[in-house]
Image (spheres, grey):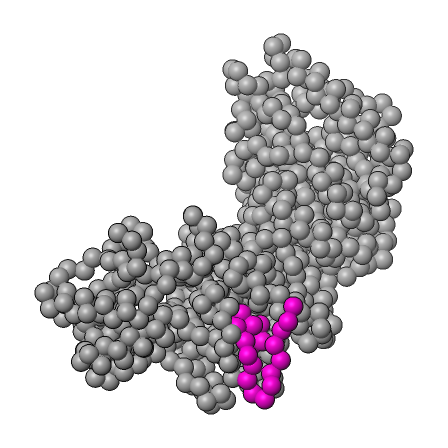
Amino acid sequence: MSFNKSWKEMEIGAVVKGGSGLLYKTGNWRSEKPIIDYTKCINCLICWALCPDSAILRKGNKVEVNYDYCKGCGICANECPTKAINMEKEEV
Amino acid sequence: MTTVAATKKFIEATGNLAVAYAVKQVNVDFISAYPITPQTIIVEALSQYVADGELKAKFVNVESEHSALSACIGASIAGARVFTATSSQGLVLMYEELPVASGLRLPIVMALSMRALSAPINIHNDHSDFMSMREQGWIMLAAEDAQEVYDLTIMAFKIAEDERVLLPTVAAMDGFTISHTLQRVDVLDDEVVRKFVGERKARFKLDVENPLTFGPLALTDSYFEFKRQQHEAFKNSEKVIREVFKEYEKISGRKYEPLKKFMMEDAEVAIVALGSTVGIARIAAKKLREEGIKAGVIGFTLFRPTPKVEINETLKDVRTLAVFERHLSLGAVAGPHYMDIISSLDKKDDVKIYDYVYGLGGRDITTKMIVDTVKKTIEKAKKNEPMEVEFVGVRE
Amino acid sequence: MTLEYKPITKLSDLPEENLFTSGHRLCAGCGPAIVARLTLLATQEKPIVVNATGCLEVGSTLYPYSSWKVPWVHVTFENAAAVASGIVEALNKLASEGKTKEAPVIAIGGDGGTFDIGIQAISGALERGHKFLYICYDNEAYQNTGIQRSGATPFGAATTTSPAGRVIPGKQERKKDLIGIVLGHHIPYAATATIAYYRDYINKVRKALSYNGPTFIHVLAPCTLGWRYDPSKTVEISRLAVETKFFPIYEVENGSLKINFRVPKPKPVEEYLKTQGRFAHLFKPENRHLIEEIQKNVDENWARLERIEKAGPIF
Ligand code: SF4
Ligand code: SF4
């Protein structure tokens, strides 16, 4: 989506609302997708802490991948201590 | 450091001290600067005011002018009323941050004690530093004497911080000639100044409860619109500046206009200048009139935005101009005043403007030089000679 | 503004909210993104962030989007520390008059903005003693402009301006001792860290913000593109940097140095180098001696740190 507001409608000085990055989805960058095997997950939160895209959501100690943003880097799978995350080819 | 205190309603002050006094009265929150001749005394005096508790501002003594303007940008984003001062090489070291202050729409006020640019290094006055700012989105005011720089410094804050404007503003004076010359300066009461400028109400600020992003990356789909907005801010400032001048006249009794006019009512030839030279030009005009030449003087108080309306009004009947530039636009056809006047005039076919570069690196300009130059201008105009930049006061 | 130091023992001690949000355009597997994320997870109170020009800044704030859910300022490349100085002092002044609220201030810059172009502004700010934390995320080259060498690029690494050529095998100069430079200002707290040791990093951010004065953290942040490795290995490589003693993790509190990870059985530096394309040329027979030289440098650096640690406070 390209930006198409008139200069009259834009806030001056290019000030942007913090956190608006969420409006831009990066999930389509992905060629592999992480799948969590919850039978192996020990809720250590390592994947949550280390995901560069903040794409692992946490509720209490439960984790879940947010595929809207996950870029498929595979860090979560690489770092999971119980190998509970598998990277699978994204279907196109 | 000896600062000045007002006895009755005036101070005995150099241009630099008059600026410092104004900045104290305006009650800035934050100052950051780096010493450089001939501006240094401004920041020394302000440091003294802070050290004596007369000014409750934070003074951050940075390690370079680049950091001075950077710190000012940070403080201004935080919502503070901000001041800096510089000259010459200091200004060009700040250069990277000049368009940033404007692009982020920060009403920072700068005092500039104008000085020649290196090389060769020279500490004396010309306008090459000031003129180098003219594409960087700052409102630009220039004073003729210490009184004007005091008044313009106060007004600069009110102009810059106006919600319709929000642009950084520079108030300049000639280095040494004004910055170091003791003059009587009529001053306003602190309360009058404070009421006049009010408190800065920042449009945005740094607030963890309402997090904003300042200075993002804006590419092909948005950058242009922000520049268009700045253009609009300059348009708006034309009105605001004139309002502020009028309002200031009410509290001070001193009249300010974008262009100063002297004996222009019936003038047949006009001398155009900026800064302290305007004063010398007045004497020259009187001398010329004694010799039967109807000369007048136009002095730029407002340099940016270009006072187009006043240029047209003032030059309605005067079509011969001797333009004095204390700046050499190397490689250009003419200097900045010449170009501004020509581009401002709605009707230009019958005007005869001749451009003269003078006073570089602090070289003196005398009444005689101006008188002779005006006579030469009249001759050239008569012969309809094409304009070619000439030099006044250089050894050929 | 200073905060009480409350170290975490486990990740669940951290708040759930992501203050560094998804949707940024940094590369998949970006080390600096992990630094940004961990930094904002670590802060006990929402900070104001000043970001020098670089990957992190460009990648996280493409108009009209911003991944920063805290006040965030970018001005130019070399002046994050100067801008932070202005913010800290202005906030302090305005807060003293009840006009605003104070918040911790963190300046963050890459190795270009820190080791090189920004070093003067940093030195000035540290000397003046403003109360802020400066974080250098070090990805060891100007990655944002396309992998050019910086003063942080290690000896032997190939970049686009220190390429591995037929005559010159990569960068010929050693990495600057950034913490050494910073310590010359006698600041109360300086530390190194890396993302693999996320708890250590988080606690260092918290500790730094508990100090009354300028503090400094140098955090190694691998770059998948510039170092040439698979994106999934970002954290693993930063761990190897510590396990081979290539990047020692230590802190200096009030002049006393403490090595935080002793590495009882260090792996040979080769183990680290071989994971990254930027060092691939060192494995050619004619360049093997450079690996030995790197190993020697690594051992000497470690011995130097141990000497300083043993000798007691350096200021
Ligand atoms: S694959 Fe990468 S981006 Fe996706 S959830 Fe895992 S760490 Fe995050
Ligand atoms: S790293 Fe593995 S074990 Fe830990 S929370 Fe994530 S999926 Fe579960």
Point out residue C26 in the picture as x, y percentages from the top left corner.
58, 43
Q: Nearer the viewer, residue B59 or B100?
A: B59
Residue shown at the point (59%, 53%) measured from the top left: B64
Left or right: C47 with respect to B298? Answer: right
Looking at the rendering, the stretch of residues picked out in magenta corresponds to: B1-22
Q: Which quadrant of the view contains residue B326?
A: bottom left
Is B7 above or below relative to B4? below
Q: Reply above or below: B82 against C131.
A: below
The picture places residue C107, in percent across and down from the top left corner, at: 67, 52
Residue drawn at (49%, 71%), measured in percent from left and top? B181
- Picture coordinates of residue B56, whole percent (x, y): 69, 73
* Nearer to me, A46 or C133: C133
Res C225 → quadrant? top right
Q: Is C229 displayed left or right of C39 in the figure?
A: left
Q: Quadrant of the N terminus of chain C?
A: bottom right
**Does B4 lie within the magenta span?**
yes
Q: Residue at x 71, y 55 (%)?
A: C128
Front-most of C59 and A89?
C59
Residue B79 in view, yes or no: no
The quarter of the rendered structure image containing the C terminus of chain C is top right
For this orientation, the residue located farthest to the left is: B383
**Total tally of numbered discs in the picture:** 0
Q: Residue at x 68, y 22 (%)?
A: C273
Q: With C154 as the anchor, is C3 left or right in this view?
A: right
Q: Does the magenta run of residues contain C195?
A: no
B110 horizontally vs A41: left or right = left
Q: Is residue C210 visible?
A: yes
Q: Quadrant of residue B312?
A: bottom left
The x and y percentages for residue A18 are: 61, 60
